[in-house]
Image: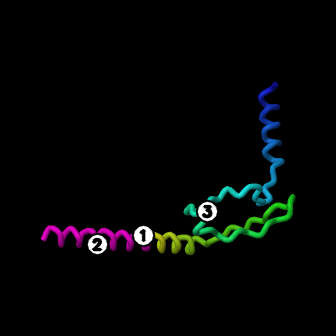
Amino acid sequence: MNPKVKENVKKRRKDDFVDDGRVIADMSIDGMPGTISRRRRKPPVPFGTVREEPEPVKLTWKERISAYGGAYAAYALFGLVMFGGLGLVIWLWLR
């Protein structure tokens, strides 16, 4: 068979699949860590319909810079507290 034909057949098979979110067999085990903090399930969608994805958030340049700056400041503060605490413990230990 021609390689291009095989590739087209594979693409068609992948495109036909529609995930409707139904659970055929629940594989969860009681007492395992995943069952303790279970997220709320989304309500089932009727078969054959496609779930609508939310629109991506569009940020302006200033908003994006502010978000990155805030995340960087939070990580820097966390690192400063952790390394400062570690330094304090080492200083008290070696004193």
> What x and y, as percent, mark residue 74?
43, 73
Which residue is identified by label 2?
85
Going 86% across and 60% down the picture, which residue do you hit? 47
Of the residues tagged 1 and 3, which is closer to the observer?
A: 3
Quarter of the figure with residue 56: bottom right
Q: Element under label 1?
A: helix
Q: Nearer the viewer, residue 22 or 60?
A: 22
Q: Nearer the viewer, residue 75 or 64?
A: 75
- N-terminal of the pair, mark 3 or mark 2, is 3
Quarter of the figure with residue 20: bottom right
Furthest toward the top, the residue is: 1
Q: Amino acid at mark 3?
A: Asp
Q: Which residues are magenta?
A: 73-95
Which residue is identified by label 3?
30
Which residue is identified by label 1?
75
Q: Are marks 1 and 2 in contact (CB under 8 Å)?
A: no
Q: Amino acid at mark 2?
A: Gly
Q: Nearer the viewer, residue 62 or 86?
A: 86
